[in-house]
Image (cartoon, helix red, strand yellow):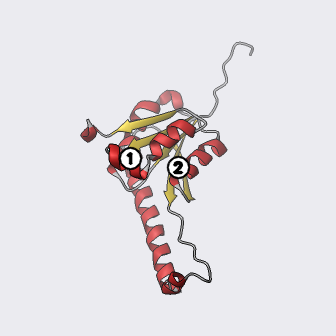
Amino acid sequence: MEGAKTKKESKVVVAVDESEESMFALSWCLSNLFSEDHIDSTLVLLYVKPQSPVHSSFDAAAYMFSSDVVATMEKYGSELVRSVMERAEAVYRNFDANIKVQRIVGRGEAKDVICNTVTKLKADILVMGSHGYGFFKRALLGSVSDYCAKNAKCPVVIVKHPAQN
């Protein structure tokens, strides 16, 4: 039919981490961006693991990291991913919508992984929680959400936790 609209599947990426702010952003996203009209939408849960420390063979500190320590660190990282994804699943299970969910775990600098992932997925929107860092902490550490708002190749919604108001 000439006048019929074809529904395009949309991808909504939500950056999740261990924080209450990210879980609140996920809940906000589900309440405000998913409805019966968005049956063809996919929720993408994106968790970014920090980059593992890399040591050269000449680095004296590298000798301190035995294979047992590295294995323990990797196991902890995997358990953290599982824990965060389980918390996220508990949040979206509370919503009645039949939502398609995709889980992605990236590794590296969070701001770069997030921006690269939304570009690769051709995401329609990125939702992130705001950690509410003050001026000095944000100046020292930088803000992942600020960076993504400026550099992501899709619209970005930064959700403030009510405790930050």
| SS at mark 1 in the image | helix
Residue 115 percent location from the top left of the image: 58, 45
Sequence-wise, the earlier of marks 1 and 2 is 2
Judge depth for marks 1 and 2 and give the one in front: 1
Along the line of sight, the residue nearer the viewer: 93 or 67 = 67
Residue 39 drawn at (x, y percent): 54, 33
Above or below: residue 155 compared with residue 50:
above
Residue drawn at x 42%, y 65% as measured from the top left: 80
Q: Residue at x 48, y 85 (%)?
A: 64
Q: Residue at x 33, y 47 (%)?
A: 136
Residue 93 seen in the figure: no
According to the picture, the residue beneath numbered tag 2 turns out to be 111
Q: Position of residue 143 (x, y in %)?
A: 44, 46
Residue 160, compared with residue 84, is above or below; it is above
The quarter of the picture where the C terminus appears is top left
Mark 2: which amino acid?
Lys
Badge 1 crowding class, 10 Å Cα cut-off, few under 14, some 14 to 19, many 20 or more, is some
**Residue 3 can be seen, yes or no:** yes
